[in-house]
Image (spheres, coloured by chain):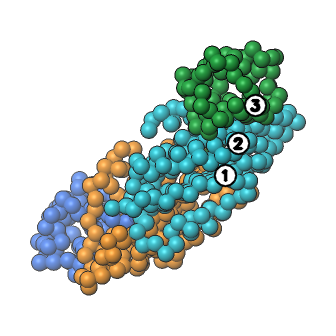
Chain colours: A orange, B cyan, C blue, D green
Amino acid sequence: MVKAANISVRVQREDFDVAVEQKRITNGRRDIGAVVSFVGLCRDEQGTLAALELEHYPGMAQSELQRIGQNCTRRWPIQELSIVHRFGKFVPGDNIVLVIAASPHRQAAFDAASFVMDFLKTNAPFWKRQHLTNGENGSWVSAKIEDDQAADRW
Amino acid sequence: MVKAANISVRVQREDFDVAVEQKRITNGRRDIGAVVSFVGLCRDEQGTLAALELEHYPGMAQSELQRIGQNCTRRWPIQELSIVHRFGKFVPGDNIVLVIAASPHRQAAFDAASFVMDFLKTNAPFWKRQHLTNGENGSWVSAKIEDDQAADRW
Amino acid sequence: MKLVYFAWVRERIGIDEETISLPDNVTNVSQLLTWLKDRGEGYAAALEHSDVIRVAIDQEHADAGDSIVHAREIALFPPMTGG
Amino acid sequence: MKLVYFAWVRERIGIDEETISLPDNVTNVSQLLTWLKDRGEGYAAALEHSDVIRVAIDQEHADAGDSIVHAREIALFPPMTGG
């Protein structure tokens, strides 16, 4: 049997260190078989993005991520689940979000991390606005239909 | 357009450092949106396993992982793919395998890492034998039907 | 009752939050949106396409028919784009 | 032609590798397995259930009907259990 999952959720301005988070999960344990980590970064393929600003709903951001985590660990045999979501201003290359799932089994770890990301996209109260290199500032990023579809598949 | 993927494959006795591998992939880049990493560890839930020994087919292990990597990056828009597989002796908690996939898009990164793990399990020439805490030594781990099924879904 | 606004809903309405007293006949989420729309130009612009507006009651996602009678804090915001 | 063995195939046969000359009528993978089975007790034990034995020709996975005529190195091993 897999013991009840530990769920850790943080909403913060500061950067995170994937290695530190991963070590906190696996250190000294003998029962973890698979660790899947997802890092979402601020991306700029065409050189048009100067910065992203991420607004969030304090309090609800934390509790909604916790709810997503609980739904996830009810569904898969997960030993440890960590979710870290940043807010504030980002330039391309910056870390935005981290999800780590540890399980005895690889498919559960993959599914859990993927599930959390899909629901985080559609349900966690964060909003992005972009500042462009051409000086155009402040347009809000539109929600994607594909993100709703990704969450619907679970 | 996503540029042709860089595929890095290593078969080694030494441990790997997830953080170092991940940094090598993302450092100084602005075009990566998602990094999925998978770490497979030597696991012992019941306290019966003293150690695992991993035998491999030198040369073929490397080239088969490379082939799996190429099949993967042909299929998804992957920017960077790293595969590290260790051989030798392991105790519970030790790292065995690492797969990191970087992509502009999260689903591609998840699928790529999962695809590589599924085919690595069924196609990469590595064999595990277990040494038990009760002194029983050397029995070979049997291949799992579920692993073949996991590879068949792609 | 406290109302809080985020992202372009906040920008169009022009304030982060406000405390209001609702008329007795405004008891659920969709009635609240209809009532707010008439409070001025900013509200009308923010709630023009009220079907895309998401609502949270006491920091949990809510649907159009959900009761707001016992709510302490109601949030209005556009579809989320985090991650 | 060089033959290499891994895991319990290696253990049952009792050697890591060997160089052999094949008779002219052994030209594909399944003929090789049948021929090897008759070479002694260890071979018989290793290849008892020859349908589970995996074969690689020059370090690429091969099927039962694949030709071995131009092979330099043929490997025999059980189903893989890495990862």
Q: CA distance from mark 3 to mark 2?
A: 20 Å
Circles 1 and 3 in contact, beta carbons < 8 Å = no
| Residue at 72 percent of width and 48 percent of height | B87
Q: Position of residue B20 (x, y in %)?
A: 62, 67
Q: Which chain letter goes with mark 1? A: B
Where residue B53 sits, quadrant-wise, is top right
| Residue at 69 percent of width and 22 percent of height | D22
Q: Which amino acid lies under the numbered mark 3 shown in the image of this protein?
A: Thr
- Kindly state the secondary structure of the residue where label 2 is placed: strand
| In the rendered image, residues at marks 1 and 3 fall on the same chain | no
Mark linked to residue B11: 1
| Residue at 13 percent of width and 72 percent of height | C44
Taking depth in this image into account, of A22 and B97 the one nearest to the observer is B97
- Kindly state the secondary structure of the residue where label 3 is placed: strand
Q: CA distance from mark 1 to mark 3?
A: 26 Å
Task: Give the vertical position of D37 relative to C75 (above or below).
Answer: above
* Viewer can see residue A101: no
Circles 2 and 1 in contact, beta carbons < 8 Å = yes
Please give left or right for residue C68 compared with residue D1 in the image.
left
Q: CA distance from mark 2 to mark 1?
A: 9 Å
Q: Residue furthest right?
A: B135
Q: Which residue is mark 2?
A: B56
Q: Which residue is mark 3?
A: D19
Taking depth in this image into account, of A125 and D66 the one nearest to the observer is D66
Q: Which chain letter goes with mark 2? A: B
Q: Position of residue C24 (x, y in %)?
A: 19, 64
Taking depth in this image into account, of C3 and D20 the one nearest to the observer is D20
Q: Position of residue A151 (x, y in %)?
A: 36, 50
Task: Give the vertical position of A107 relative to D26 (above or below).
Answer: below
Please give left or right for residue B114 compared with residue B131 in the image.
left
| Residue at 28 percent of width and 62 percent of height | A143
